[in-house]
């Protein structure tokens, strides 16, 4: 029986067709993986976990007085573990944001500027802590370190981290 093409040609066409299909699916697989990787990198570049000394230097940069530096570092370590991306949903439907765990009930608003700091809470989750520092100082001016349960529970009257060598 003859179809005008010999068996060898048919086999080679079939092989080429299968090979092309495999290549196409491999390409789309690579594309998908690249998209996922890029999105993850974008998310990571926004969030940051400071080392203890990086944090101390950052606080000095934003004019936190050296006298209380170890109190601030202790406060941040106990509130957020020095992670800018930390959020904590509270039972009263408010939430705490970022490295200083600033609360959305009083100090900022979800999704828009507001609260006593006139800030959008989500802006406390990126790696630029200059705005967080400004708001934290306002909280401190009103309540002192007692404004943070993390400081009251884990820092008050306890040995504090030594950051003067940083
Ligand atoms: Ca910020």
Image (cartoon, rainbow, N blue to C red):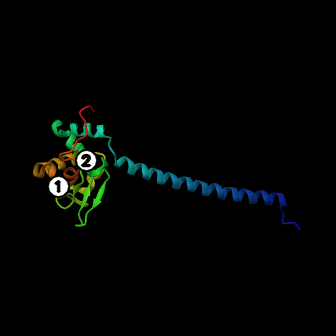
In the image, residue 2 above or below residue 26: below
Residue drawn at point x = 75 percent, y = 58 percent = 13
- Checking the image for residue 76, the label placed there is 2
Residue drawn at point x = 75 percent, y = 60 percent = 14
Direction front: furthest residue: 158
Q: Which residue is mark 1?
A: 118
Q: Quadrant of residue 26?
A: bottom right
The spot of residue 9 in percent (x, y) is: 81, 58
- 2 and 1 marks in contact (CB < 8 Å): no
Pick the residue in front: 70 or 53. Answer: 70
Direction top: furthest residue: 165
Q: Quadrant of residue 11?
A: bottom right
Q: Residues within 10 Å of mark 2 (few under 14, many from 20)?
A: many
Q: Say whether disc 2 or disc 1 marks the residue closer to the N-terminus.
A: 2
The spot of residue 130 in percent (x, y) is: 23, 44
Direction right: furthest residue: 1
In the image, residue 103 above or below residue 158: below
Pick the residue in front: 81 or 44. Answer: 81
The spot of residue 77 in percent (x, y) is: 27, 47
């Amino acid at each position: 029986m003859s179809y005008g093409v010999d068996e060898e040609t048919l086999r080679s066409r079939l092989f080429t067709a299968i090979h092309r299909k495999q290549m196409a699916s491999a390409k789309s697989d690579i594309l998908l993986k690249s998209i996922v990787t890029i999105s993850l990198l974008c998310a990571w570049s926004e969030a940051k976990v400071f080392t203890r000394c990086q944090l101390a230097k950052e606080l000095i940069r934003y004019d936190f007085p050296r006298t209380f530096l170890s109190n601030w570092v202790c406060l941040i370590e106990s509130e957020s573990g020095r992670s800018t991306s930390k959020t904590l949903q509270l039972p009263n439907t408010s939430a705490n944001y970022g490295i200083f765990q600033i609360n959305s009930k009083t100090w900022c608003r979800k999704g828009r500027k507001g609260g006593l700091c006139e800030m959008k809470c989500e802006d406390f989750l990126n790696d630029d802590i200059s705005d967080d520092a400004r708001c934290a100082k306002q909280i401190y001016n009103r309540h002192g370190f007692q404004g943070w349960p993390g400081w009251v529970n884990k820092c008050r009257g306890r040995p504090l981290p030594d950051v003067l060598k940083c």
